[in-house]
Amino acid sequence: MSAVLSPTALSVPTTQEIAGEKKMLLAFWVTGFLALMVGIAIGVLQSTNYAGIDLYPYLQPFLKTYYQGLTLHGVLNAFVFTFFTISGWLMYLPARELNLKPMMGLAWFTYGLMLLGTLMAAYAMFDNSSSVLYTFYPPLEGSPWFYLGITLVVVASLLPLAVVLDMRARWKKAHPGEPTPLVTFMSATTLLMWLLAALGAAMEAVFLLDPWSLGLTHTIDPLLARTLFWWTGHPIVYYWLMPGYITIYAMLPRQAGGKLVSDPLTRLAFLLLLVFSVPVGTHHQYTDPGIAPVIKGVVTALTLSVAIPSLITAFTVALSLEYAGRRRGGKGLMGWWMALPWKDASVAAQVLALVSFIFGGAGGIVNASWQLDNVVHNTLWIPAHFHLTVGTMTTLVFMGVSFWLLPHLTGRRLYSPKLALASVWLWFIGMMTWGLGGHWAGMDGVPRRSWVSGLPHGQYMRLYGAVHPALILVGIGGVIAMLGAVAFYIVFFGTLFGRKDAKAMVAIPFAEVIAGPQGSIIVRIADRLGFWTLVTLIITLAVYIPVLWPMITHPIHAPGFVLW
Ligand code: HAS
Ligand code: CU
């Protein structure tokens, strides 16, 4: 019945063999979480803003406006935190699973390039020359440091693909005819998806933003730029999600005391995520003019398809958790749920993240339908949606991973497991409260990205008094999550600088599987990664050529604006 995930997965390699690789992942992980720390600190200002409390006047001269704060919050959390942690994670896991040495020179080059890009963009954001928000929609104009910095970060994020494909090729050579081991398959699929996804932003940067900000062109086409941005901007959310799914599928079941129920279903979910993620970016532009209605209809259908792999995930993972809970003695309909190891902060983080994702995903399905999106677009509903998805599903999962990963990488004991557990619950409760308030206020028409607390109090109450309870929830949620973050970073740094302990060097908790890959036709078909990448490219071009052609043949020439 049960098959081990891969022959090498459960072996514990000697510290010496992998010390360099551990150092590499630690560098990526710590840099990402440092960016997140700054991003979260600024985030609380965004939450209190909606509750009607303007803290920005107290932060002069560090942060001049709400929009500067919001730009830093979005870029540091959504790009810098994710790109660093994901790049290191996706190179390290296959190396351990396959027991092969990754191309360390390229791995460190990735780190250096990403750091350089981050520093350039951070400089441009902190000096308030680029308060263009994390979507940098032109004709809002930022400094070349910002656009060039982001360009370097994106280029760097593509390099781990070469590292992973190289290891996969070497492994395949030594194991002819065998399917790629699961975690390596998931890492490669994520990075191949991201390669096709990044083409949009790359074109936007190279042809539009970089030359414009350098003064080589004097006007910009806002519609074309937005469309290329969302080519990348939608699938980037799966680039944030899939690395979290790797631990949810391939590690959480073991941490919870069970097994992953199906290897082939896991691969099917990742294959569908590869194929359907990229062509649907125009669902962020349902209200934009200049895109044919028929395309918006097609994109609605395609977007609903990309929810299918997450629905598969919901069932596969719920069953794996149920198996774990019953093995631990849980009885009856929901007894297994209570029997999960809730005291383990790493498990609690991941399971609570999944609970939040039920609501985040349901909101996404509302956004996906063209008609319903018209009700919620550009309202606080949208940030509520993404604070439950990237802000909880991705972030809380990676917080939970940190609780075993840091001891694994440093050989130091987890600092205060109790505080770790408290941080998880505080983050979860804070974000769920934020999510509730944000969805509610959004349905009542409160706009996103608005410095509402900058209004005179009477005017704020006249406009938003009726939804004030919802906006207070947003403020309270942000503060609770902030407390969770403080607890989390005490544990994070407490572990990094804590006591060495030989027993702390835990192995990666790769899970065993119940239904293995042997003899599965899905596994055989899914393993043809080159073919599926080509299929995805063809579908993407089939959707995007009709979208882009009218824009290219009828260009808009807009001058730039610097507003804040
Ligand atoms: Fe989204 C806007 C559609 C998922 C992030 N999304 C955003 C933005 C961000 C974002 C950042 O169609 C804002 C961008 C901006 O600034 O303008 N999104 C979707 C859809 C999905 C979806 C259909 N989004 C995500 C994920 C994100 C993310 C994941 C980050 C990581 N989103 C949209 C649309 C917009 C949008 C439109 C534009 C809206 C507008 O007007 O601007 C789907 O992938 C969601 C599928 C998910 C599910 C949930 C499955 C549940 C699971 C948990 C199971 C629980 C278990 C626990 C096992 C169907 C897997 C056991 C528990 C028991 C009780 C048994
Ligand atoms: Cu999207």
Image (cartoon, rainbow, N blue to C red):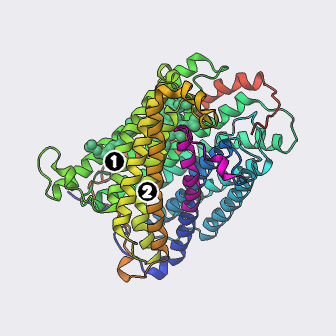
Residue 394 or residue 440, whichever sits in front: 440
Extreme residue in the left direction: 332
- 351 to the left or right of 176: left
Residue at point 68%, 27% (across, down): 548
Mark 1 or mark 2, which has the lower sequence index?
1
Residue 348 shows in the view: yes
Callout in the foreground (1, 2): 2
Image location of residue 363, percent across then percent down: 43, 32
Image location of residue 287, percent across then percent down: 60, 22
SS type, badge 1: helix
Please give the range of residues in magenta: 33-60
SS type, badge 2: helix
Determine the image quadrant of residue 412.
Answer: bottom left
Determine the image quadrant of residue 518.
Answer: bottom left
Q: Which residue is mark 2?
A: 484
Residue type of the residue flagged with mark 1: Pro
Q: Quadrant of the N terminus?
A: bottom left
